[in-house]
Image (tube, coloured by chain):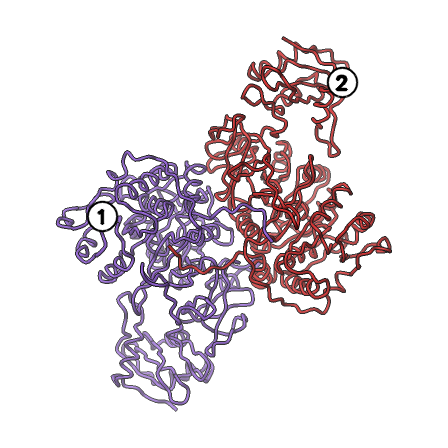
Chain colours: A purple, B red
Amino acid sequence: MYSTMQDVPLLISRILTHGSTVHGQAQVTTWTGGEPHRRSFAEIGRRAAQLAHALRDELSVSDEDRVGTLMWNNAEHMEAYLAIPSMGAVLHTLNLRLPAEQLVWIINHAEDRVVLVNGSLLPLLAPLLPQLENLRHLVVVGPGDRSVLDGARARVHDYEELIADRPETYDWPELDERDAAALCYTSGTTGDPKGVLYSHRSLYLHSLQVNTAEAFALSTRDITLPVVPMFHVNAWGLPHAAFMAGASLLMPDRFLQPAPLAEMIETVRPTIGAAVPTIWQGLLAELDAHKRDVACLRTVVIGGSACPPALMRGFEDRHGIRVVHAWGMTETSPLGCVSHPPAGVSGEEEWAYRATQGRFPASVEARLIGPDGAQLPHDGTAAGELEVRGPWIAGAYYGGAQGEPLRPDDKFSPDGWLRTGDVGTLSPDGYLTLTDRAKDVIKSGGEWISSVELENHLMAHPDVTEAAVVAVPDDKWGERPLATVVLNQGATIGYEDLKAFLGERIARWQLPERWAVIPAVPKTSVGKFDKKVLRRQYADGELDVTLLA
Amino acid sequence: MYSTMQDVPLLISRILTHGSTVHGQAQVTTWTGGEPHRRSFAEIGRRAAQLAHALRDELSVSDEDRVGTLMWNNAEHMEAYLAIPSMGAVLHTLNLRLPAEQLVWIINHAEDRVVLVNGSLLPLLAPLLPQLENLRHLVVVGPGDRSVLDGARARVHDYEELIADRPETYDWPELDERDAAALCYTSGTTGDPKGVLYSHRSLYLHSLQVNTAEAFALSTRDITLPVVPMFHVNAWGLPHAAFMAGASLLMPDRFLQPAPLAEMIETVRPTIGAAVPTIWQGLLAELDAHKRDVACLRTVVIGGSACPPALMRGFEDRHGIRVVHAWGMTETSPLGCVSHPPAGVSGEEEWAYRATQGRFPASVEARLIGPDGAQLPHDGTAAGELEVRGPWIAGAYYGGAQGEPLRPDDKFSPDGWLRTGDVGTLSPDGYLTLTDRAKDVIKSGGEWISSVELENHLMAHPDVTEAAVVAVPDDKWGERPLATVVLNQGATIGYEDLKAFLGERIARWQLPERWAVIPAVPKTSVGKFDKKVLRRQYADGELDVTLLA
């Protein structure tokens, strides 16, 4: 039966219009290394309108065109965040940390005709220009040596000159809320990068969720510090959510080192910050070393990878800052789980809850799929691959302008759920605990063995420096674990003793039969264990493996 | 351009499933006058499934059927709130305070085949039964004298017997999020009652909004006390929002008097409550008279009509409870505005903000339309009729099963905005201050004069007991104000003096020419000024009117 409610689409232009009028006095403060630069939401709104006019009238950007941004977190990036989707184009945030060849591949795949780039990033972009097939316009934002662009085929514009003197309002089109609004590629370790095309609907709903009390509860009383880059899953949704709620923003630009972070916190007094563990680890060391007034911070959100408990306790015990653990991925917008403990728990029980990945909100359904493809109970014990479903969860990847959306089997289930590639448990009250990546799990006789769990136990042994466990083929069980260990200098412990040590901690059937001492665990460029190399070394017979009964 | 996000509808069944699993330990506590009755969200979820099975299999309720509820706020009403929309039927909440003939009209217009009724309300419903054309099944919830139903044509069921032994899970259908989920009629003072058909989408989005920090920020740390009835705009959205967030609920059932309210607050310790001013006025008097421990309450939400400042200050100064003013109506779901002050204000400035109706969220657009139909600036001065637009704002009324949706011109603008019938101002930072009802405003020569403003000034005069100002026809100006005043016993002040008193407070052109002393202002059944009667008395020459130059 019909309802009698108005059919009003959920659009980024609503966030823009609301934030820049009702919350026009809120501010985006950009750290510059010197005097912080402040711009009101009202001014952001006027400049977003000017940017949209410039893109449409001067650079011929029309509906559905992808507009790239190679930018730090700053006020101009915020303007692009609002203007580009609102005018009907697609904001394509470019990850400035990617290897050059991946950046080229991504810009070409997205067919970016226009790229906004911070002047400070020109040295990074300039060498790639000859390979960017579709690029027609380069808009340079802020100071930087533009001589590196000499000879570029693309027309070069100065951001401020481009938007100057254009109308300060724009008649934002009434789009379909399911239209694409933003594009972000995963930096997948295998295969080509894959693009997630967020819709106005997904970004809008995600913003509402970020502002709920069970997530980050942004309000006009907040100043939000997204240290997480705006090219990294939309800075976890914080810029749009903050603009919606009238929460001011502190943008760190390129100043991501511990000392300037501490200084900007002391100066601008943000109430909530969000970053990956390494950033907070650095800040914690800085705060421990130099006394700073950071009492303004009510919450520090940690995500992107598992958060060491010592980091959480360090912030809380020594600096009175509450750390909240969160989990998500590019394909999940990214929230995802937030690890607020349930009401009424305290002490070690509370810490145990807070060390989990947290709980999903109502809008994200979660299920665990076991090795045989069956759904597992949410009993806190059964471990399976996490699959999720919801209005801000990806159901496919961008297939290019001419292509169909991509739905690889290893990423999406036949009934459309996202396969996260993460393995873990869900408790009866919905807390997610991740134990492994699906590709690193050992599939042994219809059961899964967590490589990470074995590694953690082995690395707890006083004689062991590092340990990496990988799956190797086994005639009887399909796969079995191979334990590779790096011993401390001078240690002489034998495999039998290590196995006995493990045997006290895990089930008997999970104990590895194959063991090898290695000089060091191979690492990827970002310092993670490179298990591909170990598996290849084993297959090629390069490891000195001992087989225990 | 397509987005690659999953197309997952926003449905009440998601709130039901999420709340009853992830937040299965949260509780709905129903006040009984004796031992409070507690039921976990998990149990509510199982019983909602049983109710859906019973309605479908036993009472043949199918898609789109309206199922009426004539119930207090209690756990069983919560079950109906979740089960009926989730199965695809429409929850039709019935206002037990309406005059009998309106209740009959509404039940017949909605074609309710099934009504759930609290046993304690049978004496109210029984006399109406012969006139309820479509009613086939009456489901009695809780104790009550069922002998009053003897001879009823409808089949009578006991709720507990009806749902007992049915499956505790239900395969909730994947509905269209724009399908109707709930129906609530306005108790319009003129014409027939009008039904607003909320959709799954509108209720879901509204629940998200209720849980944001800028609204009521419900979370697992809360126990929510909706004193506002569940038949009054879905108890302002609190039941669905609380279930979504895992916030426990305290349901007062029929115990709405000050003493039991104070007792249930002291016993169950809610953190947030919501009610109309008269309820809180009663509670405040109770708290002033008898010491109670109500420190559990972080917030008291007041809505439904303007909140006297003394009430807000009384709760805050004498009991440490923060009062938040909110505004909405049946057609707006109801949020609406919430009067949190902006960041950084304090003292009298803060109180001035908090006395306004508050700010709209991003999802609700607001505009002011002046006497000539033009849009007015949001400058805090220009007063016009408030019109609103958004995904949880009504765009029409229910036209009955065979009829088209109703869009009366006085309720909806040609471009589809809701005409609220309220007149007021919007400040540059979005705060709404209502001054009058549009029907009570005096349209004088293309400008509006607020009757309420004149009344407030007149009633501030020491010789005046009451004053009512109404519009009367005027050849030159269209309309002019007629001031009717009730003088204190023994007062002898003349019209000229009253006019001079007014003249010091309002603009000259707003001063009434027509004056009449009356013995008392006519009142409606709920105690509001009945200006219809005064206008008729003037037209019929029944008032002794003096004309001043």
**In the rendered view, would you say B84 is above or below A502?**
above
| Location of the N terminus of chain B (image quadrant) | bottom left
- Give, as a three-letter code, the residue at label 1: Leu
Q: Is residue A455 left or right of residue A430?
A: left
Q: What residue sits right under mark 1 in the picture? A: A138
- Residue indicated by mark 2: B542
Residue B260 located left or right of residue B380: right
Q: Amino acid at mark 2?
A: Glu
Q: Regarding mark 1 in the picture, which secondary structure is present there?
A: strand
> Which picture quadrant has residue A405?
bottom left
Determine the chain carrying the residue at label 2. B
Q: Position of residue B389 (x, y in %)?
A: 52, 41
Query: In this view of the protein, can residue A320 be seen by the observer?
Result: no
Question: Is A549 situated left or right of B345 in this image?
Answer: left
Which quarter of the figure has residue B447?
top right
**Relative vertical location of residue A157 with respect to residue B381 in this rendering, above or below:** below
> Where residue A389 sits in the image (x, y, percent)?
48, 63
Q: Quadrant of the C terminus of chain B?
A: top right
Q: Give x and y (percent) for residue A260.
A: 30, 48
